Image: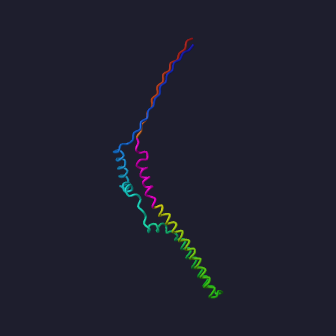
Amino acid sequence: MSAGFGSSKSSSSSNSNPLTADEVASYYAKLNSLSGGRLNDFATNGTPQLTTEQIQAVGGMGADQQRQLDVARKQAVDQVTADPNLTIDQRQRSTQLTNQDYNDRLAAITKQIEAQKTNLAQNNAGLASSDIATLANIYFGGKGQSSSSGSMSRSFNVSGGIK
């Protein structure tokens, strides 16, 4: 015959407490110090808005396309004027058609550039609200909590037997 006895006890606890206003202010002051004061400037002023000139200067929008178009037009006009088989009327008509094609393509490039500028201006205007979200994430994104946890476990076991 045998007999046994067993006992087990387990417990755990967890504690979480938000940082105090002074601790959060200290955290922010340290971030501002590490950024050379840029965080405070960013928090109070947001991202600076681009000027029209800065938007127009971005990447030389359309400059390569326009240069290629200018070169192609010059080559076409040079070829027409150098052809001895064309009459004066034919040369004028060919030059006129070349100029129309050039102007149509230039208008298309201009529309593309304006669309890019509009898109950039719209994105630029929207930065302020995302700046606030970014700042809030930096300021409150999990940095305002401290936590601790612990666990304890005990067991007791007795067994025996009789023969």
Pinpoint residue 107: horizontal percent, then vertical percent. 55, 73
Work out which quarter of the rendered image holds the N terminus and state it: top right
**Magenta stretch holds residue 163:** no
- How many labels were placed on the picture? 0
The residue lying furthest to the bottom in this view is 88
Quadrant of the rendering where the C terminus is positioned: top right
**Residue 39 falls left or right of residue 95:** left
**60 up-or-down from 130: above or below:** below
Left or right: 86, with 7 as reference point: right
Q: Position of residue 116 (x, y in %)?
A: 51, 66
Residue bounds of the magenta highlight: 125-145
Residue 14: image x %, image y %? 43, 35
Against 142, residue 102 (above or below) is below
Q: How is the image coloured?
A: rainbow
Q: Is 131 a magenta residue?
A: yes
Q: Residue at x 51, y 68 (%)?
A: 114
| Residue at figure coordinates x 36%, y 46% from the top left | 24
Q: Is residue 20 above or below residue 39?
A: above
Dominant secondary structure of the magenta stretch? helix
Q: Nearer the viewer, residue 41 or 5?
A: 41
